[in-house]
Image (cartoon, rainbow, N blue to C red):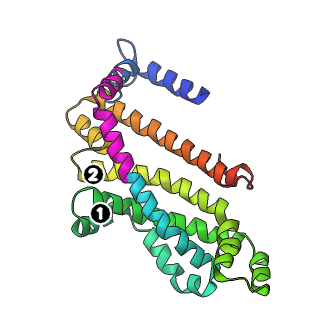
Amino acid sequence: MLCWLVMGTIWYLLTVGKRPVIDPLFLAPPKETFIALAEGVRNGDLVLAFGVTLGRSLAGFLVASLFGVPLGLLLGGVAAVSKSVGGVIDALRSMPATALYPIFMFAFGSGSLSKIAVAAFVCTWAITIYTAYGVRDSGETRRFLLRIHKVDRVQYLFDGLLFPAMPAILGGMRAAVSLALVLTIGVEMIVGTTNGLGQSVYNAQNTYRIPEMYAAILVAAFGGVGLNKAFVLFAHWLTPWSERGGGLV
């Protein structure tokens, strides 16, 4: 809370007075920004834009989780797979998302599917890496004992791979859920769309409606913080045995 107060005070001091430190054309004063924020919420424009962007980012995040967790378990649990495809994974996760967007647009069109695909592609590798390292760091002793007792494959999957790596998996998913929101907004701004927070920021910037632009940025910031906090609560509930929910704060 103190951090928000400090940032708000600095923002106010930089933008008020007859000769503000920063021209209002570049940084709107807090009063005008919050008036624009209230108006955007009242008429539903910002609420709709945030809802569309949130839906796209969560869809990309869920797709990434469905692919990233199993792939990470495979990479972390089977050394031969890690050695054979580890370099490919490193190459794929190093590719810039914006450079790949034309490929996704050709494949999925210019609508929401292509934006979801970009978020899913990038977030998949983040979750994969976290999961693989979580499996490796959990140690081999548990899996060795499970193999000695000749447990079935399902039990080995859960008790030997998934559950021990769960804190790391949740850490990767937490990073990915924020990354998905950032990517979605970025693609909406760069490529354009009929709705979404990125489009709201872009339109307001191009028409010099600076308070409206910062109002949309605030919605993105508060939405991102809320999304992160919600996921941390979910992680604490899901892994009560792990210290602070897998080290999530």
Is 90 drawn above or below residue 176 in the view shown?
below
Sequence-wise, the earlier of marks 2 and 1 is 1
Q: Is residue 183 visible?
A: no
Q: Is residue 11 left or right of residue 117?
A: right
Splitting the image into 4 quarters, where does residue 218 fall? top left
Q: Is residue 172 visible?
A: yes
Q: Residues within 10 Å of mark 2 (few under 14, many from 20)?
A: few
Specify the label residue 101 is tagged with: 1
The secondary structure making up most of the magenta span is: helix
Residue positioned most to the top: 18
Q: Which residue is mark 2?
A: 190
61 and 85: which is toward the camera: 61
Secondary structure type for disc 2: helix
63 and 4: which is toward the camera: 63
Label 1 near label 2: C-beta < 8 Å?
yes
Find residue 92 and report its horizontal and vertical position in percent: 43, 72
Q: Magenta residues, as a range?
A: 35-56
Splitting the image into 4 quarters, where does residue 73 fall? bottom right
Q: Is residue 7 left or right of residue 120?
A: right
